[in-house]
Image: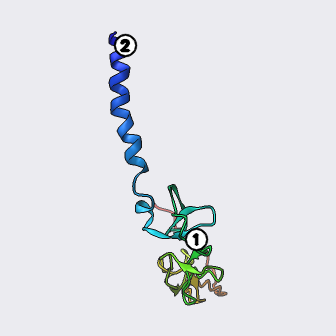
Amino acid sequence: MKKFLGVFILIIFVMPISVVGQSGCCSHHDGVAGCGANGKQICNDGTYSPTCTCSPSVAPTPNYRYGCTDPNAYNYDSSANKDNGSCIAKVYGCMDKNSMNYNASANIADGSCQYRKEIIREEDVSYSTKTVKAKKKQ
C-alpha cells in the first residue's frame, strides 16, 4: 500500500510539470510569426511551435528564411527575408595578434597591421694588436 501511495504522489507532482512545459506556444521564441504549411505555428525566431497549431481559418504564412537582412552588416545573409536581430556591425582593423596595433574588436582585416622591425647592422671594425712583454719581478 505504501508503494502504491508513493507512486500516486509522484504522478501528481510530475503531471503538472509536463503540462506547464507545453503552454505558451511561441512565448519562449519571441512570439508567433505566422502559420506554417504543416499547420503548426511559426515562431519569430524561425522555429515551429512544438505544441500549438493554427486555426483552420488561418492561411499558411510564407516560409521565412531568418537571418541578417542588413547589407552593410558583417554577417549579411542575402537569402534571408526575415531579420532575426543577429546582424553584426563591420569593424575594420588589424586582426594579427602579433602586430603592435592588434584590434580585438576587428572582424575585417584592413591591411593596417604594424610590426616592430629588428635592425641588425654589421660593420667591419679595423683594429690592431700589440704584444707587450711582462717584466719580471725582482
> Image point 34% across, 19% down: which residue?
6
> Image point 45% across, 63% down: which residue?
29
Q: Nearer the viewer, residue 67 or 95?
A: 67
| Colour treatment of the image | rainbow
**Which circle's residue, 1 or 2, is located before the other in the chain?**
2
Residue linked to disc 1: 133
Q: Position of residue 38 (x, y in %)?
A: 63, 61
Q: Quadrant of residue 66?
A: bottom right
Of all residues shown, which one is farthest toward the front? 57
Q: Position of residue 122 (x, y in %)?
A: 65, 85
Q: Vertical placement of 112 versus 131: above or below?
A: below
Quarter of the picture containing the C terminus is bottom left
Q: Which mark is residue 105?
A: none
> Image point 37% across, 47% down: which residue?
20
- Cα–Cα span, label 1 and label 2: 111 Å
The amino acid at mark 2 is Lys
Q: Position of residue 23 (x, y in %)?
A: 40, 52
Kindly state the secondary structure of the residue where label 1 is placed. Answer: loop
In the visual, does 1 lie left or right of 114?
A: left
In the visual, does 54 lie left or right of 62?
A: left
The amino acid at mark 1 is Lys
Kindly state the secondary structure of the residue where label 2 is placed. Answer: helix
Residue linked to disc 2: 3
**Dot 2 alpha-carbon crowd within 10 angstroms: few under 14, some 14 to 19, many 20 or more:** few
Instruction: Give the mark toward the camera: 1 or 2.
Output: 2
Q: Vertical placement of 122 versus 35: above or below?
A: below
Quarter of the picture containing the N terminus is top left
Q: Nearer the viewer, residue 45 or 55?
A: 55
Q: Position of residue 81 (x, y in %)?
A: 59, 81
Q: Nearer the viewer, residue 133 or 124?
A: 124
